[in-house]
Image: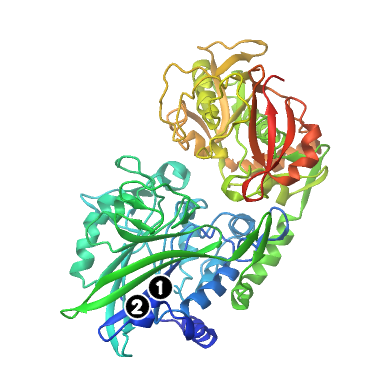
Amino acid sequence: MASFISPTRRAFLATGAAAGTFSLLHPFSARAAGGTAHLRLMSTTDLHVHVFPYDYYADRPSDSLGLSRTASLIDAVRAEATNTMLVDNGDFLQGNPMGDYIAYERGMKEGDMHPIISAMNVLGYDASTFGNHEFNYGLDLLMKAIAGANFPVVSANVVKGALSAGPRSDTLFVKPYVIVDKMLTDGDGNDAPIRVGLIGFCPPQIMTWDSRHLQGSANTRDIVEVAKAYVPEMKEAGADIIVALSHSGISTEPQTEGMENASLYLAGVEGIDAIVTGHHHRVFPGDGYEAAEGLDPSAGTLMGKPAAMGGFWGSHLGVIDLMLEQDAGAWRIAGSGSETRAIYTRDGRAYAPSVEDYAPVLAAAQTAHDETLAYVRRAVGETSAPLHSYFALVADDPSVQIVSQAQTWYIEQMMKGTEWEGLPILSAAAPFKAGGRGGPEYYTDVKPGPVAIKNVSDLYLYPNTARAVLIDGATVKDWLERSAGIFNQVAPGASDATLINPDFPSYNFDVIDGVSYQIDLSQPSKYDPGGNLINADANRIVNLTYQDAPIDLAQKFVVATNNYRAGGGGTFPGADGSTIIFVAPDTNRDVIVRYIVEKGTINPSADANWSFVPQEKTSVLFETGPAGSAHLEGVKSVKIEAAGDGADGFTKYRLFLDN
């Protein structure tokens, strides 16, 4: 399982060496002596097809993303160390309109090069692994895409076909690991060989999230179980050190079978020396995680082992430094350190690039970039009202409203001639772009007038496919209780209480259209941010009505949603895969496009079907993007006023609950 150095990789290595200044060597390189050597492991994660520093949804350049910028970081960081390696941690194939253009418009034939692979080929990667989003477009496109990679893609827990008696006898889509034979230069300038094992892991939940592509063709195993099976084999094969490419987040929740965010427990597997982690779209080391047993976010260690998570979309480069020393002819780790490097600096709300684009990366994807721009700029209809998500977490919202209208329109047609024809149809939709970790510009904002494909992508961020589930009125209420967990409990009479729980992602805040309801913030949440029941008697959802009458808890309802939610994503009551009655051949984006084309001109004004229960002399604070001020007057259902600057470029607002 030895690797090779391609001509493009040699060229990049040579460029880095020529451009670097070795006067600023890392301390490990500077103080290495004979028999000791510094190895720097650089990593990218969650690139999501972001080659160019360009936001296709906003149709404008962006200084906070892009592999072309990360590449320049790689060049500089490589020059600080005597020995380096570069890996990618997955989720490279899907995530922006360029990925959709390749999958849905251009297609992939045998021998075609995918633009993200072409760009990565320039940089000299030693290996990559599968992330969960690699499977969004199906196995055929995935395998054609990675066939063009001049680096190995490894994944140990995604199984081809049925599971066997154990992990090591499974048939896999790609190799479970690779052992890279590398020459290390020690402190005296002498070269000595080292064997570095790289093994990859993916969240087992892909079998739920992408069941339409994987059912009958693939299976998954628990991450830690598979690591315990393969790491001894890697040692037997001669690996001096082993690095896990873990497309799995960091969680301190108790370890469970099939755990999605298992990197902490993976680090505890004997024989693994370092962890490249991701999936969470956060930065590690850093303040994105709280210290806990086995988790040191300051030192950048998991179970005492060095780890790094390099943000997302190319925003950061993960860096793990290993001081190695020879012991009886083998290498062992004598010291380590972890950090991340950002491609930008930030001053308030403004981003400024800390590096320039690496031109060969841009050139590798230039044609696809130009074609993607033409693809996203096509008009499909018009809107008579603005579509924005600046206040989607505090009031019924036009960007969510149009998604629900389109889903309802579509599922009504799909139910004709079925046993469910005539049942009431509801629609569940969430605001995907509502700030959070995406930053103060991460909002939907479509002006009245022509609506292009780029705007539909802005409205619906992911290439989900439409689904319909069948549940009763009691489960509708519980679904909404789960959604209402995004809000903190607010005592009556409180002044400027914090409204939003930052650990609750906006894409799990489902608004259900077709019913009307209120949310009582004085009550505790029934569910925690992970969907676990914590207050069985909590009752935040009140005055829940259907057609102006209290909802019949036994009444059956068809709910239009997406494959992620219907299959169990977000852990919602009534949405675990068992209630699905319709699997659509169409993506939710396609449904929205068809709806806009059908209507010609849409009027997506929110119908205010949900609100907060009034509380006298009570106010709360929340943050949104500064551009939301232009839409404040259009929010009629709640009383809101500006309350100064928020953190990290956001704007703070005060909402009065006695309105």
Q: Is residue 408 left or right of residue 467?
A: right
Q: Seen in the image, is 320 located left or right of residue 75? A: left
In this view, 229 is above or below 209: below
Say what amino acid the circle numbered 2 marks: His
Estimate how packed mark 1 is, as few (under 14), some (14 to 19) or many (20 or more) residues with alpha carbons within 10 Å: many
Q: Which residue is mark 1?
A: 126
**Quarter of the image containing the N terminus?**
bottom left
Mark 1 vs mark 2: in front: 2
Q: Point out the residue furthest to the bottom here.
A: 189
Is disc 2 placed on a helix, strand or loop?
strand
Find residue 104 and report its horizontal and vertical position in percent: 61, 54
Q: Is residue 45 visible?
A: yes
Look at the image and tell me whether residue 1 can be seen: no
Residue beneath the point at 73% across and 57% down: 59
In depth, the one of 325 and 459 nearer the eye is 325
Q: Position of residue 441 (x, y in %)?
A: 68, 50
Marks 1 and 2 close (CB-CB < 8 Å) = no
Between 231 and 623, the one nearer to me in the picture: 623
Instruction: Measure how far apart labels 1 and 2 are at the Cα level.
Output: 17 Å
Q: Which residue is mark 2?
A: 38
Q: Is residue 112 above or below residue 531?
A: below
- Residue at 71% from the left image edge and 51% from the top image edge: 454
Which residue is pictured at 21% across the width and 73% down the height? 238
Label 1 is placed on what type of residue?
Answer: Asp
Secondary structure found at label 1: loop
Q: Tell me where residue 259 appears, x and y as whole percent.
A: 34, 44
Q: Is residue 274 left or right of residue 658?
A: left
How far across and how far down the image is residue 206, in percent?
A: 42, 46
Where 339 sits versus 619, above or below? Answer: below
Quadrant occupied by the C terminus: top right
Mark 1 or 2, nearer chain start: 2
Q: Nearer the viewer, residue 8 or 241?
A: 241
